[in-house]
Amino acid sequence: MFKKKYIFLIINNTSDVPIEQLLNKNITIILRIEKKINIENLISFRVRCKKNRVKLFIANDIMLMNKLKADGLYISAWNKSLKARFLDKKRFSIIGACHNYREINIKINQGCRYLLLSRLFKTNYKFKKGFL
């Protein structure tokens, strides 16, 4: 039996989420940065997250995670680097995304504390045929 202990929101833009209106405090926001973003906006977003007890994880960017003093690092499935394995994990957690058993082993080797499993069941997506 699985229990929903955590809820993860993956966002690309900080203006997408009204943090003050989130009712569940077990929410973790994963911020993917696709293009250059104003660092002042990110810092104010981090302050709002901290004020409302919402955890903030930064996707695939260790330097930005340290600069924002984020709660953790999110490592996407395509990221195979083992750099995160050697970081001091007392200050933050690492979440890894994986799509198959091989990627699960890679994420364990990267030192991920949590794993986000994708495509647990068979789907009819055109380009996403595999599932766990």
Image (spheres, rainbow, N blue to C red):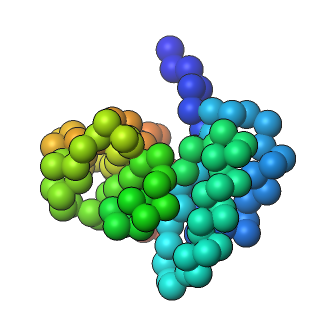
Residue 124, horizontal then vertical, whole percent: 51, 56
The image shows residue 129, relative to residue 110, as above or below, that is below
Residue 32, horizontal then vertical, whole percent: 50, 66
Query: Residue 114, can we see it?
Result: yes
The image shows residue 103, relative to residue 125, as above or below, that is above
Residue 72, horizontal then vertical, whole percent: 42, 48
- Residue lying at 39% horizontally and 53% vertically, measured from the top left: 73
- Residue lying at 69% horizontally and 34% vertically, measured from the top left: 25
The image shows residue 96, relative to residue 80, as above or below, that is above
- Res 38 quadrant in image: bottom right
Residue 24, horizontal then vertical, whole percent: 73, 34
The image shows residue 13, relative to residue 55, as above or below, that is below
- Residue lying at 34% horizontally and 56% vertically, measured from the top left: 75
- In the picture, the quarter occupied by the C terminus is top left
Residue farthest top in this picture: 1
- Res 43 quadrant in image: bottom right
- Residue lying at 59% horizontally and 69% vertically, measured from the top left: 42
Left or right relative to 109: residue 2: right
Residue farthest bottom in this picture: 36
